[in-house]
């Protein structure tokens, strides 16, 4: 009820909270852009550069460039997600905790 409302108001008006939200949003946006670039970069390469992707990795090698690149995008996505989750859990949680503690005081 009223108590929670007041606490929320205090959290919301805390400049640290505002900074936290904008930092988190910026971080999410940057991550999303990187993901989009990786994903669409791969699709665009496949669409426009078939000969390059079909190039064999070396003489006598069966794997074409497209396969490791596709796997690369998936690995890149997993790594990015992992970094994001780890950073969100450590840094963001600590900041959120500080903000909440200050509001509850």
Image (cartoon, rainbow, N blue to C red):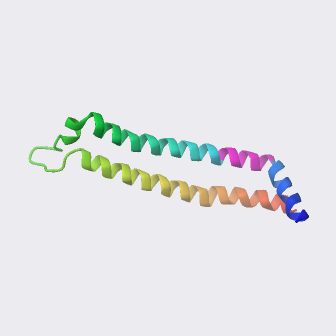
What residue is shown at x 19% (from left), y 46% (from top)? 64
The image quadrant of residue 51 is: top left
* Residue positioned 34% across, 42% down in the render: 42
User: In the current view of this chain or complex, which residue is farthest to the right?
Assistant: 2
Looking at the image, which residue is at 34% across and 41% down?
A: 43
Residue sitting farthest toward the top? 48
79 sits left or right of 17 in the view = left
Q: Main secondary structure of the magenta part?
A: helix
Q: How many marks?
A: 0
User: Eyeballing the image, is 16 above or below 4?
Assistant: above
Residue at horizontal 19 percent and vertical 41 percent from the top: 54
> Would residue 27 appear left or right of 79 to someone viewing this image?
right
Image vertical order of residue 47 relative to residue 94, above or below:
above
Q: Nearer the viewer, residue 7 or 19?
A: 7
| Nearer to me, 102 or 56 | 56
- Please give left or right for residue 101 compared with residue 84 in the image: right
Q: Quadrant of the C terminus?
A: bottom right
Q: Which image quarter holds the N terminus? A: bottom right
Q: Nearer the viewer, residue 85 or 6?
A: 6
Residue 86: give x, y in percent of width and height: 55, 59
> Which stretch is magenta?
15-23
Q: Is residue 18 magenta?
A: yes
Position of residue 36 measured from the top left corner of the image (x, y, whole percent)? 46, 43
Please tell me whether residue 48 belongs to the stretch shown in magenta. Answer: no
- Give how far across and how far down residue 45 sits, in percent: 31, 37
**Position of residue 9 measured from the top left corner of the image (x, y, whole percent):** 85, 54
């Amino acid at each position: 009820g009223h108590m929670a409302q007041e606490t929320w108001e205090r959290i919301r008006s805390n400049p640290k909270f505002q900074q936290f939200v904008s930092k988190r949003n910026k971080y999410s946006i940057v991550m999303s852009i990187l993901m989009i670039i990786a994903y669409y970069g791969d699709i665009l390469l496949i669409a426009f550069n078939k000969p390059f992707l079909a190039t064999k990795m070396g003489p006598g090698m069966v794997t074409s460039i497209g396969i490791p690149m596709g796997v690369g995008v998936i690995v890149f996505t997993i790594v990015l997600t992992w970094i994001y989750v780890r950073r969100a859990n450590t840094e963001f949680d600590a900041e959120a905790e500080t903000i909440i503690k200050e509001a509850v005081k």
